[in-house]
Image (cartoon, rainbow, N blue to C red):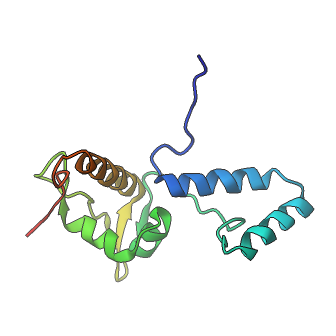
Amino acid sequence: MVSVVIPFPRLPPVERARRIANSLLALLPDAERQTMTARAHAVGETWLGARLVTYADDEAITTRQAAELLCVSEAVIRQWACMHHPADPDRRLLARAGRRGREQTYRVRDLLDASAAVRLARAVRGRGGGAGGLTRSA
């Protein structure tokens, strides 16, 4: 049996696919890379060939950066910071790390964990698990 290691296991599936596609694109010679990128852009897939942004797990990033990383809106990030964690209702789904000027910040590892918890709760809910344990704080 072949053992398969999933790259970027904590990222949402769409973001994981984008990173893999861009990593493979980077292996092509320059001319082929430009041709493939142009073809993708011509059909509306403008993310291909985009600059990849990487963060350390313990890095604190802004709400906007968090939304871009997880391919969700800034409103979703703010909502997660107000929700109870499905596995532990005594804590928030997404902890705030602090502030950078006027901007709220969040640790990358907490964002990835929150995203995974939401996906898991949705999967459970899809199998008849009710609200999947996601509740909004008062």
| Closer to the camera in the image, 49 or 61 | 49
The residue lying toward the viewer, choosing from 112 and 47, is: 47
Residue 127's image quarter? top left
The residue closer to the viewer here, 7 or 105, is 7
In which quadrant will I find the C terminus?
A: bottom left
Total marks drawn? 0
Furthest-left residue in view?
138
Q: Is residue 121 above or below residue 94?
A: above
In the picture, measured across the screen, residue 116 lies left or right of residue 65, that is: left
Q: Quadrant of residue 4?
A: top right
For the point 59% across and 16% down, the residue is 1
Q: What x and y, as percent, mark residue 3?
A: 57, 23
Q: Residue at x 67, y 75 (%)?
A: 44
Residue 72 picture location, percent across and down? 42, 69
Front-lying residue, 70 or 56:
70
The residue at the far top in this view is 1
Side of 132 relative to 43 (left or right):
left
Location of residue 11 in the rendering, given as x and y in whole percent from the top left corner: 47, 51
Name the residue furthest bottom.
Answer: 102
Residue 20 location (% of width, % of height): 64, 50
Q: Quadrant of residue 37?
A: bottom right
Residue at (71% x, 73% y) in the render: 43
